[in-house]
């Protein structure tokens, strides 16, 4: 069995996705949460003060094999390049990162293709007096460091000004150029105590109208062809009516992938498809809503290895012949600390740490810290999952679960 390394800020979601696809994994991240350690062959913690520079050295202790990087490392291309020198890279290489993480190059490509995207203030210019603008880090991750800009704010070599588009924050997930599905993003939610503009979860899949689906499908094909994107990657956009404004590309496995996997009962292929000379044939995307029901029988669950074509295997969410696909909506939310917390020795998350690990069971809690962990105000504590059949129902269940944690953690201030 192929053993895949997962490295980045947090490895748990990608490790569990790999398990659903039939792979074993080792991991290097900042947390080594309890539900990660029970599912990997081995893991190592990267000290916060040595992140991310220590990752290649820590990864070197593990056996040869492919490595997949998660959120944050796209902003450190020298680390990606160092990993790729000694391992097969399950992710986009250095030259692709340079293209898609340049907001001006991305905006130019989108505009040339006739696709909507927020305006950018030219490099070296101050924030304009008219309109609403965001000041965003060039090396952004999870929405951290973003704020509203003020008229006349001076330019910075580490930031850029992007037009603020009021609307619904969304995320689209692709493999190569194929659209897998769309989710709504939870951003800066006060009931999760998240900082302003901080990523704090997804609800999905979301069925978008045909115009939006066609636009997002076309956009994925264009970005894969023009920018060389491959493997699993994400696109953040704002939906205003039937117009989608593309914000940025996340050129690696994203936190929304597991939401679509749990909802659709399908593990997505992780190894990037080869793209000879930077191009290559892309999969034909499906503009229909993600994970539609099938007439009778089963829909395949896709697994791949780096050297094999996709292999079809049954999904645990399919019933017998004629029963079709069980559709459901998944809610995922990151709960942030309202105040300093000493993580308690026991709690409702214990059930998710008991018994044999089943990668297809939707947990109630994930990213579970060790007992006694000191968590400061504003830091992420753990992740919540709920299921339902309607978007509003799922949001209400997440809010109710967060309120329960408010009461629980009120008793565990240091």
Image (cartoon, rainbow, N blue to C red):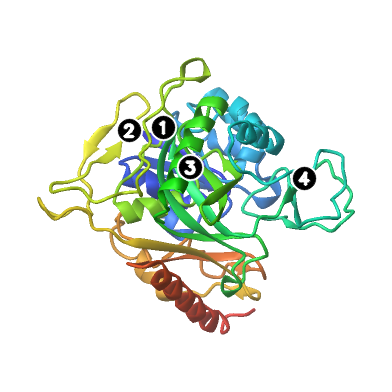
Q: Bin the neighbour count of mark 2 within 10 Å (Cα to Cα): few under 14, some 14-19, many 20 and up.
A: many
Residue at the location (56% across, 84% down)?
411
Residue at the location (44% across, 39% down)?
217
Q: Where is residue 115 in the image (x, y as percent from the top left)?
A: 58, 39
Query: In whole angstroms, how far apart are the C-alphas of marks 4 and 1?
Result: 33 Å
* Residue 304 numbered tag: 2
Q: In this view, does 272 lie to the left or right of 380?
A: left
Mark 3 vs mark 4, foreground winner is 3
Quarter of the view holding residue 8: top right
Q: Mark 4 points at which residue?
A: 160
Q: Earlier in the sequence, mark 3 or mark 4?
A: 4
Q: What element carries label 3?
A: helix
Q: Name the residue under label 3.
A: 216
Q: Which of marks 4 and 1 is nearer the N terminus?
A: 4
Query: In whole angstroms, how far apart are the C-alphas of marks 3 and 1?
Result: 22 Å
Q: Bin the neighbour count of mark 3 within 10 Å (Cα to Cα): few under 14, some 14-19, many 20 and up.
A: many
* Residue 271 numbered tag: 1
Q: Which of marks 1 and 2 is nearer the N terminus?
A: 1
Quarter placement of the N terminus: top left
Q: In this view, does 325 lie to the left or right of 149?
A: left
Answer whether residue 353 is visible to the viewer in this image.
yes
Answer whether residue 54 is visible to the viewer in this image.
no
Quarter of the view holding residue 262: bottom left
Q: Are marks 3 and 1 in contact (CB under 8 Å)?
A: no
């Amino acid at each position: 069995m192929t053993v895949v390394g997962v490295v980045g800020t947090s490895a748990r979601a990608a490790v569990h996705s790999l398990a659903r696809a039939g792979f074993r994994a080792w991991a290097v991240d900042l947390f080594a949460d309890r539900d990660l350690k029970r599912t990997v062959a081995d893991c190592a913690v990267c000290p916060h003060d040595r992140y991310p520079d220590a990752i290649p050295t820590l990864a070197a202790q593990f056996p040869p094999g492919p490595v997949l990087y998660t959120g944050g490392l796209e902003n450190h291309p020298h680390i990606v390049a160092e990993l790729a020198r000694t391992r097969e890279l399950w992710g986009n290489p250095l030259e692709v990162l340079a293209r898609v993480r340049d907001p001006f190059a991305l905006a130019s490509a989108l505009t040339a293709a006739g696709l909507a995207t927020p305006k950018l203030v030219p490099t070296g210019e101050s924030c304009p007096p008219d309109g609403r603008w965001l000041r965003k880090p060039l090396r952004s991750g999870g929405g951290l460091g973003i704020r509203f800009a003020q008229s006349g704010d001076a330019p910075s070599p580490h930031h850029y000004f992007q037009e603020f588009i009021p609307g619904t924050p969304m995320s689209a997930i692709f493999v190569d150029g194929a659209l897998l599905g769309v989710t709504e993003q939870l951003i800066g939610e006060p009931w999760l105590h998240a900082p302003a503009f901080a990523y704090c979860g997804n609800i999905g899949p979301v069925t978008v109208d045909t115009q939006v689906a066609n636009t997002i499908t076309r956009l994925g094909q264009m970005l894969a062809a023009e920018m060389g994107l491959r493997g699993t990657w994400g696109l953040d956009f704002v939906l205003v009516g039937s117009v989608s404004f593309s914000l940025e590309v996340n050129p690696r496995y994203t936190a929304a992938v597991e939401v679509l996997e749990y909802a659709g009962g399908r593990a997505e292929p992780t190894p990037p498809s080869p793209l000879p000379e930077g191009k290559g044939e892309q999969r034909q995307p499906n503009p229909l809503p993600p994970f539609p029901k099938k007439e009778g029988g089963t829909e395949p669950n896709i697994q791949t290895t780096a050297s094999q074509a996709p292999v079809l295997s049954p999904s645990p969410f399919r019933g017998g012949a004629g029963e079709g696909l069980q559709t459901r909506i998944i809610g995922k939310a990151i709960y942030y600390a309202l105040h300093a917390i000493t993580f308690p020795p026991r709690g409702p998350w214990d059930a998710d740490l008991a018994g044999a690990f089943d990668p297809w069971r939707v947990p109630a809690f994930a990213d579970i810290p060790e007992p006694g962990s000191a968590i400061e105000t504003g830091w992420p504590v753990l992740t919540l999952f709920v299921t339902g059949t309607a978007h509003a129902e799922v949001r209400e269940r997440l809010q109710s679960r967060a309120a329960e944690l408010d009461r629980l953690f009120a008793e565990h201030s240091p």
